[in-house]
Image (cartoon, grey):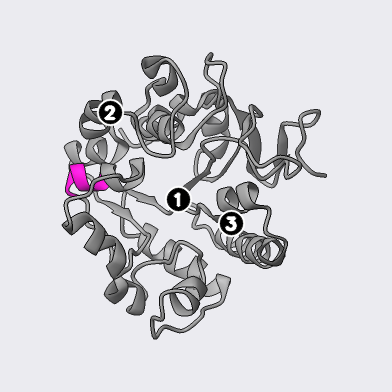
Amino acid sequence: MAPSLDNQYLQVDGKYLFPADACMEVEDLPQSGTGQTSIFCGVNAPKIVGHHFGPYPYSTLLPFIKEENIFVEFLRRKKKVAFANAYPKIFYDYINSGRKRLSVTSLSCLMSGVKLKTVTDLRRGNALSAEIDNRRWVESLNYNLPVIKPATAARRLLRLASKQNFTLFEFFLTDHLGHGRYPDLMKYTLSVLDEFLFHVMKNLPKEISLVICSDHGNLEDISIKTHTRNPALTITAGRNAEALSKKIVHLYDIKKAILELNL
């Protein structure tokens, strides 16, 4: 059984798959800047701006990102947080040059004092590459790293999450594939992601709540190169999975739903 517009709600073994509204009462196509701000900050970002905007956040959203992102909310409560993704040297060279065109995720960390992980963290097994298995770091960035199995990456993420109150891992290659429709990469990338998620959910400790979400539709319709107005696929598993699935209707509900479990 696969999710579709005619079959938007699935429940299997305490895991819940359901739609989250990515349009949020704004007519144009959802974009990452406003979508991610809505997820991380719990605000209707496209309505604040007057339209969807991306991939980077609109300037008027920066105060929300600084003061209301989910990392800073946890830190105010004296909780431990981590962003699991490692960044290569080229990223640090970019921000050290003074250029600040960054994603909502990176800005949320930098504005909250959350440590951004490096190749050293990746090499020590304390971080994940954005593509899960390190392959792009090796083949495109020429790093001397092992290409790891998705199951190994899953164990690393769960180990990191077990030490935190909130842990974020960001995977964006599905958006990249949806825009470019790269047939050579599609099968490999999705097989890595499927195996990774399988091992995360199979080995998820009972005390951990897992939320998987997207900031917009895209990959589900590769007949076009743009985003879609479809609901964003969302999955909850582990502790309070059912309660989370009932609390999330729009993207801006996700932050509040997560925080309410950690009062």
Where residue 10 appears, x then y in whole percent? 73, 37
x 44%, y 29%: residue: 53
Label 2 Cα neighbours within 10 Å, binned few <14 / some 14-19 / many ≥20: few
Closest to the camera, between mark 2 and mark 1, is: 2
What secondary structure predominates along the stretch shown in magenta? helix
Left or right, residue 134 beside residue 80: right
Label 3 to label 2: alpha-carbon separation: 37 Å
- Residue 13, compared with residue 65, is above or below; it is below
Residue at point 54%, 40% (across, down): 214
Q: Earlier in the sequence, mark 3 or mark 2?
A: 2
Say few, some or many: other residues with alpha carbon within 10 Å of mark 3 (under 14 / 14 to 19 / 20 or more).
some
User: Could you say which is closer to the camera, residue 121 or residue 12?
Assistant: 121
Residue 217 lies in quadrant: top right
Q: Please identify the quarter of the rendering in which residue 142 is found.
A: bottom left
- Residue 239 in the image: state x and y as whole percent: 50, 44
Magenta range is 109-113
Residue 111 colored magenta? Answer: yes
Q: Which mark is residue 59?
A: 2
- The amino acid type found where label 3 is placed reads Met
| Badge nearest the viewer, 1 or 3 | 3
Counting from the top left corner in percent of width and height, residue 232 is at 60, 34
Residue carrying label 1? 208
* Residue type indicated by callout 1: Ile
For the point 24% across and 62% down, the residue is 92
**Residue matched to label 3:** 201
Where is residue 194 shown, x and y percent of the image?
Answer: 65, 60
Helix, strand or loop under label 2: helix
- SS type, badge 1: loop
Type of the residue with mark 2: Ser
> Looking at the rendering, in which quadrant would you find the C terminus?
top left
Neighbor class of circle 1 (other Cα within 10 Å; few <14, some 14-19, many 20+) is some
